[in-house]
């Protein structure tokens, strides 16, 4: 059981790092991020609001992952947001190959295929985290995972 708790802790740390990095890279490169969103055929009409909402949602998920009471919801939100991003990526790539990556930072160096696989890997990790959360006997008795 200890190995599952350690694995769960690692999953939380990886998601915290992912979302914090993604959000802050978009915030620090806001004009570039907004411009790149505007190049997307689906997001061009709403690129201004999306350039604000996406990093905001990512930071909300970071906050959720920081507290025991909301960690599970943070993993659920992570899986949902990554699924939305992945479906969007696959959909947009079906129509055009010349869409700039609006990810920011190091993530913008990935190819589209690498990006899709990275997203899927994190989705799988979130699912395993949710399974481990559900099976944690400490949580059933104390309401906490025992993980800080």
Image (cartoon, rainbow, N blue to C red):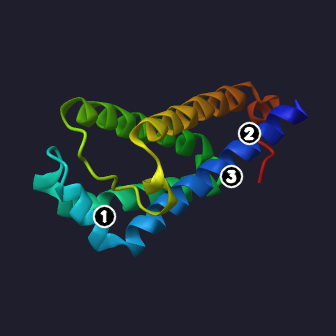
Marks 3 and 2, how far apart at CA: 9 Å
Q: Which residue is mark 3?
A: 13
Q: Nearer the viewer, residue 126 or 91?
A: 91
- Does residue 107 lie above or below 10 as drawn? below
| Mark toward the viewer: 3 or 1 | 1
Mark 3 touches mark 2? (CB < 8 Å)? no
Q: Which residue is mark 2?
A: 8
Among the two numbered marks 3 and 1 on one chain, the one whose residue lies closer to the N terminus: 3
Q: Residues within 10 Å of mark 2 (few under 14, many from 20)?
A: many
Q: Is residue 106 left or right of residue 41?
A: right
Marks 3 and 1, how far apart at CA: 25 Å
Mark on residue 33? 1
The quarter in which the C terminus is drawn is: bottom right
| Mark toward the viewer: 1 or 2 | 1
**Residue 127 quadrant:** top right
- Does residue 62 lie above or below 97 as drawn? below
Residue at 39 percent across and 40 percent down: it is: 112
């Amino acid at each position: 059981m200890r190995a599952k708790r350690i694995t769960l802790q690692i999953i939380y740390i990886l998601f915290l790092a992912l979302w914090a990095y993604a959000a802050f890279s978009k915030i620090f490169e806001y004009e570039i991020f907004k411009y790149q969103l505007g190049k997307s055929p689906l997001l061009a009409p709403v690129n201004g609001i999306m350039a604000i909402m996406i990093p905001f949602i990512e930071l909300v998920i970071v906050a959720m992952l920081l507290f025991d009471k909301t960690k599970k919801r943070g993993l659920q939100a992570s899986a949902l947001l990554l699924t939305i991003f992945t479906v969007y990526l696959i959909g947009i790539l079906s129509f055009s190959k010349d869409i700039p990556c609006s990810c920011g930072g190091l993530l913008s160096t990935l190819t589209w295929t690498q990006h899709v696989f990275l997203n899927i890997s994190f989705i799988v990790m979130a699912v395993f985290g949710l399974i481990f959360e559900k099976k944690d006997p400490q949580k059933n008795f104390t309401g906490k995972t025992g993980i800080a």
